[in-house]
Image (cartoon, grey):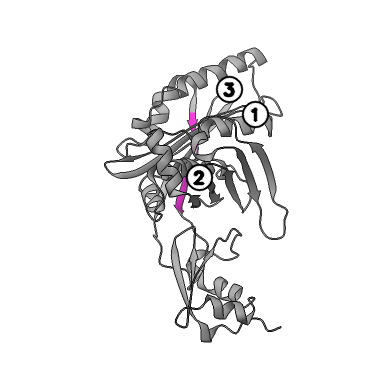
Amino acid sequence: MKRVCTMTSNISSPAFLDTSHPDTPDLVVPQGVVPFYLDNRPVRGRLVRPGVLTDMLLTRHDNPDCVLRLAGEALALVAALASALKFQGSFSLQAKGDGPLGLLLADCTDAGALRFHARSDDEAVAALLKANPNPTTSDLLGKGYIAFSVDQGPDTDIHQGIVEINGESLSEMATHYFATSEQHACWVKLFCDKTEAGWRAGALVMEKIAMGGGIESDVTPEEGDDAWETAITLATTLTAREVLDDRLGSADLLYRLFHAEGLITGQPRALAFGCRCSRARLSSLLETFPLDDLDHMAKDGTITMNCQFCNHDFHFQRSEISGKTA
């Protein structure tokens, strides 16, 4: 019997020291996230373009394309938000509703390690697509909630904000979250589609920051509001075709958008395949099961556990797991 396992906690050692880690793609996108700000304006942001990493992440799962498209947007979003963390930890998104896509999880560590899991009812998705070939995010999720969480590790509390699903797209839902839960002016645009080169995703996220606080500026509040609106107007001209085209560099895209607004780019951040499962951790987990449960889980003497993030099967001989006695 195959046992499904979804693990969410951070590991205490880097993946390259974990010899029991499964054989998953060893790919790093060096400039996956490019931070920027507009000089003497209350605007800063991040452009996210995971490139071929998107295809490697999405194609490990057999969800319908419309679900994978949404998962790609979620991965780009958490990559943008995790890049702003000032500590070791992770940023995660969880969307749960009563629609064909019952659950979507995506998270990214401060080091740029990405992963996701989506649980969908394929028959319900097929019925939805038959009625509407281009379903919105709201159509897929139905009624429910979206939670954004920041995890600083096992010895700290998880900071979480939860809002009701509101909006047609994940971009709108994220903007609604920041406006209501964080009371923070943000602008979010997410992209994902299957191109000739495979799945590609991207995100442009901007936030309005407070001037002052030790930052020298002669910008009045009214001028700051105007600069923010100008930045949004320029950002809306960014197209999916541009973001998903590997031939266009992120620096070039940002220059096209904001070169007349005092654009200053920061140090790019890398993104990578980031499942944090391991055979050793799953073996320790199995040891906590009662003997009868282990016997029931075994098929022909083998227990199979599947990580829903990287879709890798781990096989354990029943004889090597002692289990928990009464």
Question: Residue shown at 55%/60% (left/top)?
Answer: 6
Instruction: Mark 3 or mark 1: name the one nearer the start of the chain.
Output: 3
Q: The magenta stretch spans which residues?
A: 264-272
Question: Residue shown at 54%/50% (left/top)?
Answer: 107
Q: Residues within 10 Å of mark 2 (few under 14, many from 20)?
A: many
Residue occupying the far top of the picture: 222
Q: Does 237 appear above or below 311?
A: above
Residue 40: assigned label? 3
Q: Residues within 10 Å of mark 3 (few under 14, many from 20)?
A: some
Q: Determine which residue is flagged by label 2.
A: 101
Mark 1: which secondary structure?
helix
Q: Does 324 appear above or below 100?
A: below
Residue 255 in which image quadrant? top left
Q: Pinpoint residue 273: horizontal percent, then vertical percent.
A: 44, 55
Instruction: Say which of marks 3 and 1 sits in front.
Output: 1
Question: Residue shown at 39%/60% (left/top)?
Answer: 25
Instruction: Mark 2 or mark 1: name the one nearer the start of the chain.
Output: 2
Q: Is residue 5 left or right of residue 31?
A: right
Question: Residue shown at 68%/60% (left/top)?
Answer: 154
Residue occupying the far bottom of the picture: 319
Mark 2: which secondary structure?
strand
Give amino acid for label 1: Ala
